[in-house]
Image: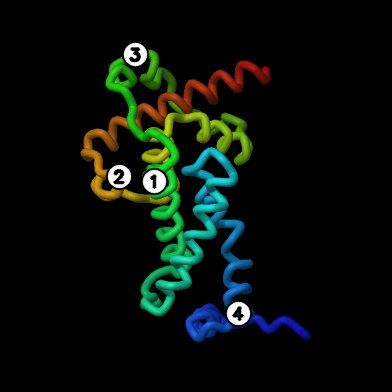
Amino acid sequence: MPTLTLSEADLIAACVRGEHRAQRQLYDQLAGLMLTVCRRYLKRREDAEEALLLGFAKMFRALPTYRFEGSFEGWVRRIMVNEALMQLRQRELMTVSFEDFVQPENLAVTAATADTQLQAEDLMGLLATLPAGYRTVFNLYALEGYGHQEIAELLGISEGTSKSQLSKARAMLQRRIQFSNISTN
């Protein structure tokens, strides 16, 4: 049987009606990208896959409430980020000791340069090595586009803590990138 490609609105409507073929098509279209989103927050692939599946279950239940305002992919991404954060809270300690905030070696000493040669996979690997709190704030701010006030509300931290953890995450990433460049030269 030939595959019929539906418009996004038609596909969503078919999913709301409970049509399994449309649900499978929507899942197939978004699963790879949304797994990448979940992997940014969760170190273990199995945890990210669990967050993905739980996120899709929530998305399908909430689909009738989607208002077609803004990007559908963005709406689904927000569900996945929230599910990944819930999984992260259950699985990893997201606190950072105060000593981490005052150590001079945690401060960025060199500006990031455009000529730094990192593949996306390498960068994801470096992000995964960050402490959970740093990684989460960095992902929400730099990759998802949340502001510090939104991050503070999502994570139950102060806006200052969000800014501080972002700064420390950047500094740590810069050091690790610099080290990886030294190691490969």
For the N terminus, which image quadrant? bottom right
Which residue has dot 4 on it? 20
Crowd rating for badge 4 (residues with CA inside 10 Å; few <14, some 14–19, many 20+): few
Disc number placed over residue 118 in the picture, else none:
none
Amino acid identity at mark 4: His
Disc number placed over residue 140 in the picture, else none:
1
Number of marks in the image? 4
Give the mark, 2 or 3, whose residue is nearer the N terminus.
3
What residue do we see at 56% from left, 81% from top? 7
Residue 133, quarter of picture:
top left
The answer for how far apart the CA atoms under marks 3 and 1 are is: 25 Å
Residue 68, quarter of picture:
bottom left
- Tell me if label 3 and label 4 are in contact, CB under 8 Å: no
What residue do we see at 44% from left, 47% from top? 87
The answer for how far apart the CA atoms under marks 4 and 2 are is: 35 Å
Amino acid identity at mark 1: Leu
Residue located farthest toward the top when viewing the structure as drawn: 104
In this view, the mark in front (2 or 1): 2
Give the mark, 3 or 1, whose residue is nearer the N terminus.
3
Which residue has dot 3 on it? 104
- Tell me if label 3 and label 1 are in contact, CB under 8 Å: no
Q: Position of residue 128 (x, y in %)?
A: 52, 34
Residue located farthest toward the front when viewing the structure as drawn: 90
Which residue has dot 2 on it? 155
Amino acid identity at mark 3: Pro
Q: Is residue 92 above or below residue 59?
A: above
The answer for how far apart the CA atoms under marks 3 and 4 are is: 56 Å
In this view, the mark in front (3 or 4): 4
Residue 178, quarter of picture:
top right
